[in-house]
Amino acid sequence: MSRLHLFDMDGTLIRGSSANIEIAKVLGKVEEFRSLDREFAAGTIDSREYANRAYEMWSTLTDEVVAMAFAGAPWLAGIRDVWQEITDRGEHCAVISLSPSFFVSRLRVWGVHETHAARFPEVPFPVGTTIDTCGVLTPAAKVTIADELCARYGVDRSDCVAYGDSMSDAVLFTAVGTSVAVNGDHHVSGIATHRYAGGDLREAYRLVAG
């Protein structure tokens, strides 16, 4: 029987950080984005307002900046190995992230079958444009995307394994058959099927690989 493995990125594949913070490090806007993150965590802004404000702060973003941020991010070890093993088993894997598509899509070269993320224009952004917030994801959208992937790959929610670390993953954790809290906070550690703390995705994967 096939399975579908669903990976969060920020805080999960990227340990202790996020795409936005890694981009902010290159741009010199870390404090601005940490403030934005605090507002989102407190519920004073939603993912669409977050995206609008991030888009404004990314007005000077270039592909070179994104590439530097991606290369310098604190990725877990073994990501490529895990996705290769999933593929070799005839199973499927996807990344579903609230982070921008221009960053998340870079993971495809590491072997993940699909990436789903907040839809942003390609960088550099056209001058004077705004983001279409209809393409911004919410935590609940992760479940909708998971259902679409289940239909595509011929599996059920019970065949899914979700990997995540925080509040944005909690809804998905309650919807699928198996979940792994990877360096998880209190929003997911209590509801996860398995818990992993460490820096190697291969070790987390072993909890469900059988």
Image (cartoon, helix red, strand yellow):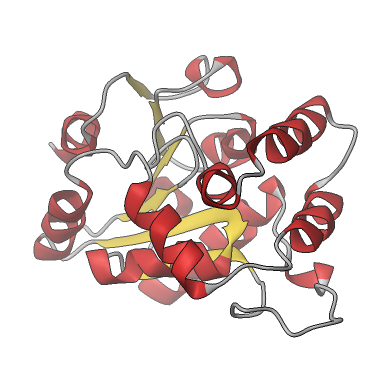
Q: Position of residue 172 (x, y in %)?
A: 57, 42
Q: Residue furthest right?
A: 44
Q: Position of residue 210 (x, y in %)?
A: 12, 36
Q: Position of residue 186 (x, y in %)?
A: 57, 14
Q: For the N terminus, which image quadrant?
A: bottom left
Q: Is residue 200 above or below residue 197?
A: below
Q: Residue at x 45, y 70 (%)?
A: 64
Judge by depth and name the residue closer to the eye, 148 or 65.
Answer: 65
Look at the image and tell me whether residue 111 can be seen.
Answer: no
Look at the image and tell me whether residue 173 can be seen.
Answer: yes
Residue 114 quadrant: bottom left
Q: Residue at x 22, y 61 (%)?
A: 91
Q: Residue furthest bottom?
A: 126
Q: Is residue 139 above or below residue 181?
A: below
Q: Residue at x 80, y 72 (%)?
A: 131
Q: Is residue 119 above or below residue 75?
A: below
Q: Residue at x 73, y 70 (%)?
A: 135
